[in-house]
Image (cartoon, helix red, strand yellow):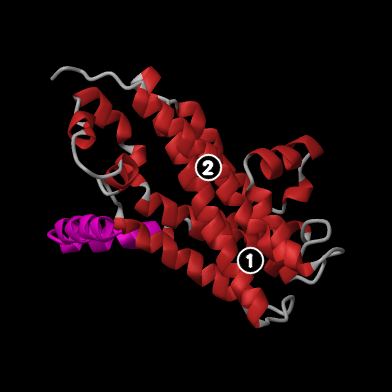
Amino acid sequence: MRLYFKYMSILFKSQMQYRTSFLMLCIGQFFVPFSVFAGVYFLFERFGGLPGWTFHETALGYGVVHMAFSVAECFARGFDAFPRLVVRGDFDRLLVRPRGTVVQVLGSNMEFTRFGRMLQSAVVLGIAAGGPDVGWTPAKVITLFLMIAGGVIVFCGICILRASFCFWTVQGLEVMNIFTDGGREMAQYPLDIYAKWVTRFFTFIIPFGAVSCLPLMYILDRTDGPDLMYMAMPLASLLFLAPCLLVWCIGVRHYRSTGS
């Protein structure tokens, strides 16, 4: 982990060389997602709400998903840019270093301007948490942090899986954006408003429901089972990450150098 934080320090210092540009990009990242949140607000303002969900309840789930996405987008950016490493043959240099390839790819690129998006998500979480729908307890606060951490892991897992296909296709598959950007847009609303097959897919295959919707039911005191089970639901993200890392390892073994 010390190597990872060293990468982080170097990249942060390099991006801060142009501070005005960095600040403007952060401001842009702060305000642009508000258009999405405004869409959620006006939906409730115009139609009165979603069946069974108030604005503050929906905003809480929105804030969790967007916070998780912004953190993953900031710190897992190396996997997003991984196709360039393969095309240029730069991945060869990573293989001869005495460190894991996952850590090196993670540290190859970070986008700290996403701090603006994180701040916007934090503002939304603050608004939602201050609403009348939640009676906060220490256990619920811990669950909230587990939800965010689990969401980060899920989004990182998707990025790793997308990058892994580059070992066979060279270029990244744009279809995976369905599960990153598309998954973010879908998971910002309660999953029970969608068709059952969609809810099941995004709960048992790609566990957005397990890290957001189900633990949210515990925070809102709507559970009909053991509270501990709902609190631990975000840990399902680790079960999703494991096969993603396995596919990555298989891809590394099948990687063929460009010879450059």
In magenta segment, residue 11: yes
Q: Are marks 1 and 2 in contact (CB under 8 Å)?
A: no
Q: Position of residue 176 (x, y in %)?
A: 50, 31
The three-letter amino acid code for the residue at tag 2 is: Ala
Q: Position of residue 124 (x, y in %)?
A: 55, 68
Q: Position of residue 99 (x, y in %)?
A: 25, 45
Magenta stretch, residue numbers: 1-30
Q: Position of residue 171 (x, y in %)?
A: 35, 23
Task: Please give the name of the residue rendered at 70% of the width and 62% of the height, measured from the top-left corner.
Answer: 215
Secondary element at image label 2: helix
Task: Please give the name of the residue rendered at 24% of the width and 23% of the height, measured from the top-left corner.
Answer: 87
- Whether residue 124 sits left or right of residue 196 in the image: it is left
The residue wearing badge 1 is 60
Quarter of image, res 162: top left
Badge 2: how crowded within 10 Å, few (<14), some, or many (20+)? few
The residue wearing badge 2 is 242
The three-letter amino acid code for the residue at tag 1 is: Leu
Task: Please give the name of the residue rendered at 44% of the width and 25% of the height, measured from the top-left corner.
Answer: 173
Instruction: Indicate which disc, 1 or 2, sits on the residue closer to the N terminus.
Output: 1
Taking the view exactly as shown, the residue that stands out farthest to the front is: 98
Mark 1 or 2, closer to the camera: 2
**Residue 35 visible somewhere in the drawing:** no
Quarter of image, res 44: bottom right
Task: Please give the name of the residue rendered at 74% of the width and 75% of the height, measured from the top-left corner.
Answer: 133
